[in-house]
Image: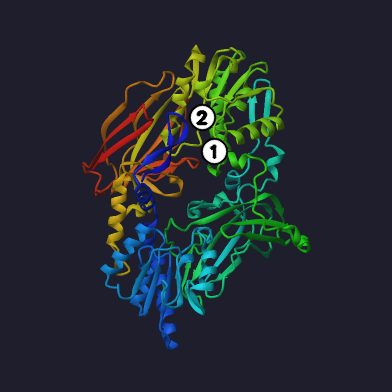
């Protein structure tokens, strides 16, 4: 039996289905899982252990046997905690078969096989009775079914079913309750992830302003949560307009309802401003009294507390449908709506409280098409004024009144910039790709219409290799431009599809064509991560329990393929310091067509700073014009310690080393050797590093 998996093809710019071995999905799931991250979460583990011990003690104190139901057991860690705390028996539910098999081995290795039964089923399929999976209902419910939004992994339906069919009335629950908190803020940076800002272009005939369409102004966007590491958001990038308030709580020891509902609270702004964003997080009380608490609160909420780094639970950013002016001291009504899996918000004036009926629980739907076309980082990229200024300066150098300009990028504003900077009679053409329907609707019927550009820019519904002279009105292209950006790209070099597209349209270009960007370079640097290394670090012993089996399982899955590949991470959220200087390792000349031969390089970089070499970071730099470049990765090394500032709109490629060396002093001669190969047939880059 074969598995078909989607992968971006950098030579076509498309997602393609590739045939893989039957166990490929399993290895992917395990290799990319957050089990290691969770096992390294000391705060989570200690609080769960304390809560479980307390729950077992309360049940035993009533003279009852402690029967535990552990839903989503993973490694079996929480069940082993319960058994160690004196539970009489534990039913550990795990739906993912390879994980359930690992849990059986881990439980056996730790000597709890007589106290823990691992059940490889979804909890909603578990049966209770003499011939069932469980002999009787449990009186202690232990779960870890939560994500950054709390309910996004289906916690509510699972709890609802468990209370109906699997646990006793009045059972103990660990965690006992969860509470969601929100804070109203104004933030140009975060708002730029949700709306398109006006674009000012200084042309020879005066300043022109590209305005966002009115359809976007009140568009609620999409309901998917924006989860980020808020602890990496500088305090200067937002203004708190309210105190932190409790939005809602869920008591897991009582029957839980998953049906859609709303919660409302009154907010009294502590500062006047534009209400744009709701920052949100949650905490868990592991016991009824709330003395054992595990919180996701960001740094400014509890500035004196030590922060536990974790990547499996972060914080949420919610965007209001539109900016709402608020005045200090004048109360407003905040409504949170949720379904089984997601939450969204609406803000109203307090006097509108009587009109609660107008706030429904329907999930928000994008009406402007922009939120279906662009994700949050892409919005931020398009709103980056410095980045736009560089493209404008570069276009100004290459455009003239006779230019025939062709743009090849996904959902790009470059054609609009090119029109603003050129003569009105010049015909501009642009190629748009996935998702084609959203691109056509947004640009043709919304953005172009709002800016009276319907007859100024022509959208060609053809892939580069299918371009015909008639598409260009039999004119040759004198200026070929691209950001380049393609929505199918996962790793930085996948946007080299621009090179393949440029090659495909060669016959439509003038002999003196200007290509912008004219070239690109792949850069690399060895780094030490502050925390991100934990997602690939073996755990060994976790709270006294041997989970080496899980470490081996992850290692085997990584060796299946992933250990030889880089993976994308937005490094502005994950601090690191450079241990080597950045190195340009490969160059790509877009003025020429893609060569038939592979591009390869070998070399070494010296480690210049003390630290642990966790991995290499790779990124692209595009050269637009003389002295004008765009980096998708490193922006600067900000101090002598080697702290790095990264492009906040792009994900960088991280290649984790299989072993770590530590350079103790600057006099060390430690170095990392590399071999990098760009296969022009596949568009993929293979790499190998040796410490």
Q: Do the residues labelled 1 and 2 touch (CB within 8 Å)?
A: no
Query: From the viewer's perspective, is residue 680 above or below residue 41?
Result: above
How far from the left and from the top, in percent, is residue 369?
A: 64, 40
How far from the left and from the top, in percent, is residue 689?
A: 27, 39
Mark carried by residue 274: none
- Please say which color scheme the image uses: rainbow
How far from the left and from the top, in percent, is residue 335?
A: 67, 60
Residue 269 seen anywhere in this rendered image of the structure: no
Q: Name the residue under label 1.
A: 381
316 or 679: nearer the eye?
679
Mark pair 1, 2: CA separation: 11 Å
Residue 456 seen anywhere in this rendered image of the structure: yes
Left or right, 566 with respect to 196, comes to left
Mark carried by residue 483: 2
Query: From the viewer's perspective, is residue 393 above or below residue 426?
Result: below
- Residue in view at x 44 percent, y 61 percent: 307
Left or right, 215 with respect to 89, comes to right
- Residue in view at x 45 percent, y 45 percent: 570
Among the 4 quarters of the image, the one containing residue 586: top left
263 or 230: nearer the eye?
263
Q: How crowded is mark 2: few (under 14 residues within 10 Å), some or many (20 or more)?
A: many
- Residue in view at x 45 percent, y 88 percent: 62
Among the 4 quarters of the image, the one containing residue 215: top right
Q: How many marks?
A: 2
248 or 387: nearer the eye?
248
């Amino acid at each position: 039996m074969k598995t078909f998996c989607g992968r971006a093809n950098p030579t076509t710019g498309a997602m393609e289905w590739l045939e893989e071995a039957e166990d490929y999905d399993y290895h992917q799931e395990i290799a990319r899982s957050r089990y290691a991250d969770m096992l390294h979460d000391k705060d989570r583990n200690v609080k769960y252990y304390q809560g479980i011990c307390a729950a077992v003690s309360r049940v035993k104190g009533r003279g009852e046997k402690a029967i535990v139901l552990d839903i989503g057991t993973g490694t079996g860690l929480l069940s082993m905690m319960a058994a160690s705390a004196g539970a009489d028996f534990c039913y550990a539910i795990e739906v993912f078969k390879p994980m359930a098999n690992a849990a059986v081995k881990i439980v056996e290795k730790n000597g709890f096989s007589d106290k823990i039964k691992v059940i490889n089923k979804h909890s909603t399929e578990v049966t209770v009775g003499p011939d069932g999976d469980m002999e009787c209902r449990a009186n202690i419910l232990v779960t870890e079914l939560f994500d950054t939004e709390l309910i996004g992994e289906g916690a509510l339906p699972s709890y609802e079913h468990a209370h109906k069919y699997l646990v006793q009335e009045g059972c103990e629950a660990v965690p006992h309750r969860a509470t969601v908190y929100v804070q109203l803020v104004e933030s140009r940076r975060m708002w730029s992830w949700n709306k398109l800002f006006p674009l000012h272009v200084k042309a020879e005939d005066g300043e022109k302003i590209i305005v966002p369409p009115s359809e976007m102004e009140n568009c609620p966007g999409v309901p998917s949560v924006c989860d980020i590491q808020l602890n990496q958001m500088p305090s200067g990038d937002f203004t708190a307009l309210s105190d932190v308030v409790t939005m809602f709580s869920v008591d897991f020891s009582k029957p839980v309802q998953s049906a859609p509902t709303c919660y409302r609270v009154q907010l009294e702004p502590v500062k006047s401003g534009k209400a744009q964003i709701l920052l949100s997080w949650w905490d868990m009380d592991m016991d009824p009294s709330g003395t054992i608490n595990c919180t996701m609160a960001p740094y400014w909420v509890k500035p004196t507390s030590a922060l536990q780094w974790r990547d499996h639970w972060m914080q949420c950013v919610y965007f209001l449908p539109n900016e709402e002016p608020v005045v200090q001291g004048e109360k407003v009504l905040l409504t949170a709506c949720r379904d089984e899996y997601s939450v969204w918000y609406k803000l109203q004036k307090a006097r509108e409280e009587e009109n609660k009926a107008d706030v429904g629980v329907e999930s928000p739907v994008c009406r402007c098409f922009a939120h279906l076309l662009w994700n949050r980082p892409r919005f931020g990229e398009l709103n980056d004024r410095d980045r736009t200024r560089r493209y404008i300066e570069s276009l100004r150098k290459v455009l003239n009144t006779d230019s025939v300009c062709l743009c090849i990028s996904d959902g790009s504003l470059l054609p609009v910039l090119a029109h603003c900077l050129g003569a009105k009679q010049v015909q501009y053409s642009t190629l748009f790709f996935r998702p084609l329907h959203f691109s056509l609707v947004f640009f043709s019927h919304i953005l172009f219409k709002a800016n009276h550009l319907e007859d100024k820019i022509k959208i060609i519904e053809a892939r580069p290799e299918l371009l015909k002279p008639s598409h260009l009105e039999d004119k040759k292209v004198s200026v070929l431009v691209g950001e380049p950006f393609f929505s199918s790209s996962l790793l930085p070099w996948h946007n080299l599809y621009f090179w393949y597209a440029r090659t495909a349209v060669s016959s439509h270009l003038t002999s003196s064509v200007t290509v912008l960007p004219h070239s690109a370079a792949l850069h690399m640097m060895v780094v030490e991560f502050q925390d991100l290394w934990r997602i690939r670090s073996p755990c060994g012993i976790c709270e006294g329990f041997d989970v080496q089996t899980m470490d081996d399982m992850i290692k085997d899955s990584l060796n299946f393929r992933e250990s030889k590949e880089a993976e994308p991470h937005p490094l502005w959220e994950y601090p690191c310091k450079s241990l080597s200087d950045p190195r340009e390792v490969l160059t790509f000349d877009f003025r020429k067509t893609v060569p038939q031969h592979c591009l390869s390089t070998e070399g070494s970089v010296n480690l210049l700073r003390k630290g642990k070499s966790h991995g290499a970071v790779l990124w692209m730099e595009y050269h637009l014009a003389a002295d004008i470049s765009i980096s998708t990765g490193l922006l600067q090394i900000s101090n002598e310690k080697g702290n790095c500032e990264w492009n906040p709109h792009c994900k960088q490629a991280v290649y984790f080393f299989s072993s770590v060396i530590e350079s103790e002093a600057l006099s060390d001669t430690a170095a990392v050797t590399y071999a990098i190969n760009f296969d022009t047939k596949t568009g993929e880059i293979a790499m190998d590093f040796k410490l």
